[in-house]
Image (spheres, rainbow, N blue to C red):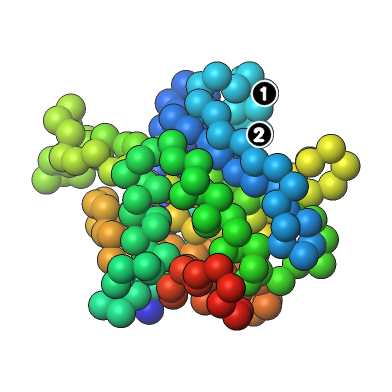
Amino acid sequence: MGKINREDMLELTRRMTLKRNCFDRIAGAYLDEEGFIDGTFNKHFQKLTPKDRQANMGLAKAVLFSDTNVQLREYEFGKEDRRPGSMWQMLMALKECGLKNDAMLDTFYEEFGRRYRADNSYAIYFFHGSYDVPLKASDKESLWESEEVYQFLVCVVCPVSGDYEPGKPECGFLFPAFKDRSSDISRINIFAADSQSCQAEDLRKILLGQVKKQGQGT
């Protein structure tokens, strides 16, 4: 397990405001406590109302503002974790399509619902974003030139109540990891509000493993 640089996370959150928004798409699903899907959504982020954009950015920022290397930890995908049929392969595809493949998202939700333990209904929120990482001079001041475009996914899992109102995120992740101000597709940052909870353990097992085929056991 590697270490996350807190400054990398803060650099990303500075691009998560209404004026400097880095997100272009939001998608998600609502699931009952048994993991069955009650409904899904997939929208262009900029078409949300300002109030909804602000509220949803707050959910995503919960991952990056969490206690680094305690609630938010870095994990590496080994060679076995990246073989065909792996969750890594699915996350790469979701990132590259910008969350525009509903069938692939449904596969993720179904896989998640089969393996995640929950006491109540919950929601999965996905965000796709991109960030032009600026070059930095020797004095650490930003230059105008872009070094690379970092494309990424933020995912949060929240309990829901009433009319699908999300509560505080219980767990989630940032993929690929943003390490040394660059994209690292071999790593993922996994968030858990309670790092010792069964949900945190479930999430790690789901993300660092294979996508199970229909009919397979858990």
Q: Tell me the amino acid under the disc marked 1.
A: Lys
Label 2: which secondary element: helix
Label 1: which secondary element: helix
User: Is residue 4 among the parts visible in the rendering?
Assistant: no
Are there few (<14), some (14-19), or many (20+) residues within 10 Å of tag 2? few
Instruction: Quarter of the image for the N terminus: give it.
Output: bottom left
Point 35% across, 40% down: residue: 97
- Image-based side of 1 in relation to 173, left or right: left
Point 59% across, 28% down: residue: 53
In the image as oriented, which residue stretches furthest toward the right?
162
Instruction: Quarter of the image for the C terminus: give it.
Output: bottom right
Q: Quadrant of residue 63?
A: bottom right
Q: Where's residue 93, x and y in %?
A: 35, 50
Q: Quadrant of residue 215?
A: bottom right
Question: How many numbered discs sit on the rendered protein?
Answer: 2
Residues under labels 1 and 2: Cα distance? 6 Å
Q: Nearer the viewer, residue 178 or 115?
A: 115
User: In the picture shown, does residue 97 fall above or below 214?
Assistant: above
Q: Where's residue 74, x and y in %?
A: 41, 69
- Image-based side of 141 in relation to 89, left or right: left
Q: Where's residue 181, x and y in %?
A: 26, 51
Are there few (<14), some (14-19), or many (20+) residues within 10 Å of tag 1? few
User: In the picture shown, does residue 172 fall above or below 73?
Assistant: above
Report the residue marked by disc 1. Answer: 51
Q: Where's residue 36, x and y in %?
A: 72, 57
Point 59% across, 55% down: residue: 109
Are the residues at dot 1 and dot 2 in contact (C-beta closer than 8 Å)? yes
Q: Quadrant of residue 174?
A: bottom left
On residue 55, which mark appears? Answer: 2
User: Is residue 93 among the parts visible in the rendering?
Assistant: yes
Q: Tell me the amino acid under the disc marked 2.
A: Ala
User: In the picture shown, does residue 167 fall above or below 69?
Assistant: above
